[in-house]
Image (spheres, rainbow, N blue to C red):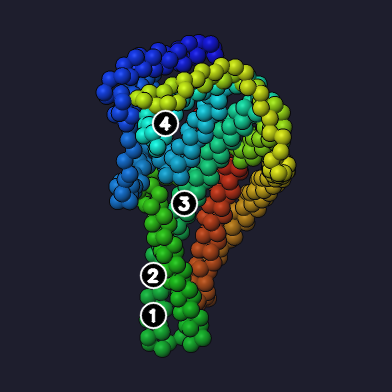
Amino acid sequence: MAVNKFMFGVLPMLLLLSGCNAGSNSAETQKPFAFLRNLESTLAEASRGTQSSVSTPTRKSLGEILTNSEPDINTKSGFAKAIANAVRVDPAIVAARDELAAQMSQVDVAKSSKDAQFSATVLGGVEDVTDKVAGVALVLNSTKVINDGGKIDARIAAEEFLAEGAKHRLQAQMDDRALALVRIWVDLDRYEKLSDLIGSRLMILNPLIEQLETVAAAGMGDASQVASAQRTVSMIRVTQSDVMERLEQSRVAFRNTFGSLPAGTKLDTGFIEKLVPSKVNNTMSHAAPALLAAYSSYQAAEANLIGTLAKRKFDLGFETKITKPFGGSEYNSDESVGIVLSKAFFNDGQLEAEEKAAKSRVDSSIAQIQSTYREGEMIIKTAQQTIKSMDKAIDLSRETAEVTREEISYLRKQLIIGGSTLDGVLSAEARLYDAESKEINFNADKVVAQATILSALGLLSKSLGLSAE
C-alpha cells in the first residue's frame, strides 16, 4: 500500500517538477511569484478528480437561523407518534445528532493517520540580498508510519469509544426529552380534567349558592352558618381560579412544545403503563444509555492513557523528502528516501505530567460511572415507590368519594325538611371535589413515575421508535 501511494503520489510530482524545470530558462519562470501561479494551476489540475469539492461556508444571520424555528407537530397522528416526532425535531436532539456525526468523522481522521501523509512547501523570495538572487524552491515530503508503539491505534480506539459514547448520550437525551414531553402532556390532561370537574361541581352547586345569597341578603338564618357557607363558596371559587390559571399555563407549555393544542388526541396512559417492567433487574439497569455513555467515556480514557504511555517508545517510519529549485533559485536539488527512527529523551517533565493527567481522567471516569449508576438506581426506585403509593392513594380517594356522595345525598334530603344546612351540603360538595381531584392528581403522578422508569432504562425512546443509529 505504501509503495502504491509513493508511485502514484510522489512519482507524478517528480515528473511534474521535471517538466516545469525544463523550461526554467524562459522569462516567465525567472519570475518566482509568476511561477507560483503556474504551479498552483498545475497542481490543481493534477489533483482534480481525486478531491471532493468543498463549498465555501456562508455565515447566517441570527434572524435567518431563527426563521421557522417554531414547532409544528401533527398531534392528530396519535399520542406516541406526536411525542416521537417532537423529539426528532427538537433542536437539542438535532444538535446532539450532529455532534455524533462529527465524532464519527473524527474516527476516520484518526484512522487516516496510518496512511501515507503527503505535504508540499513552496519557498519564494530573495535568497541573497547582496547578489540579488531570487527564486522559488518546492519541498515535497512523504511519511508513512511503520511502528509508533501503539499511539495511533490508541488514538483510533479512543475516538471510536468517544463516538460510541456520543451515540449512547444521544439515546439518553432522547429519553430525557420524551419524558419531558410526556410530563407536559400529562399536566395538560390533568388540568383539563380538574377544570371539567370543578365546572361540573359548580353547576350542581349554583342553585345552592343562589339560595345562600338570597338568605344572606335577607338577613335570615343563623349568621354563623351563613358566614361559614360563604367561606366554603369562596374557597371553591378560589380553587376554580387556581385550576384555570394552571390550565392556561399548561396550554402555553404545550403550544410552545408542539405548536398547537392536541386536536382530539388524548393522553394514552395505557401505552406507557404496558411498557413498564414488573421488575427491574441488573441486566436492564446496566443497559441504560446514560450508564453506557459513562462506560464509553471510561474506555476512551483508558485508550488515551495507553497512547500517552506509548510516547515513551521509539517511532519508526518511512520518509521521503524532495527539494527542487526553480526560477533562478540557488537552492541545491535534494532527494532523500529512508527509514526514520525517533524518540524524545527529555521534555522537562511534560510526559510525566501527561501520564498523570491521563491516569486521573481514568479514575474520574470510573467515579462518574458509579455516580451515574447510583443516580439511575435512585430514580428508578423512587419512581417505583411513587407508583405503589399512588395506587394506594387512588383506592383511598375513590372510597372517600363514594362515601361523600352518599353523605351528600343524605344531606340534600335532610335539607328539604330542615334536617341539614346549606353549609353542611356545600362543605360535603367541597370534600367530594377534593377526593375526586386527588384521584386525578394521583393518576397523573403515577403516569409520570411510570414514564420516568422507562426513560431511566432507555425504554421510552425505543418504544417510540427513536434510535441513535
The residue tagged 3 is 184
Location of the N terminus (image quadrant) = top right
Q: Which residue is mark 4?
A: 123
Q: Residue at x 69, y 43 (%)?
A: 350
Q: Nearer the viewer, mark 4 or mark 3?
A: 4
- Residue at the disc numbered 1: 213
Front-lying residue, 220 or 22: 22
Residue that sits furthest to the front in the current view: 130
Query: Is 358 displayed left or right of 435 in the figure?
Result: right
Residue bearing mark 2? 206
Of tags 4 and 1, the one toward the viewer is 4
Q: Circle 2 sits in a helix, a strand or a loop, which is it?
A: helix
Mark 2 or 1, nearer chain start: 2
Q: Is residue 166 visible?
A: yes
Amino acid type, callout 2: Asn
The foreground one among 360 and 72 is: 360
Q: Does the residue at mark 2 contact the one at mark 3 (Cβ under 8 Å)?
A: no
Q: CA distance from mark 1 to mark 3?
A: 40 Å
Kind of residue indicated by mark 4 = Leu
Q: Is the C-beta separation of discs 1 and 3 under 8 Å?
A: no
**Identity, as a three-letter code, of the amino acid under mark 3:** Ile
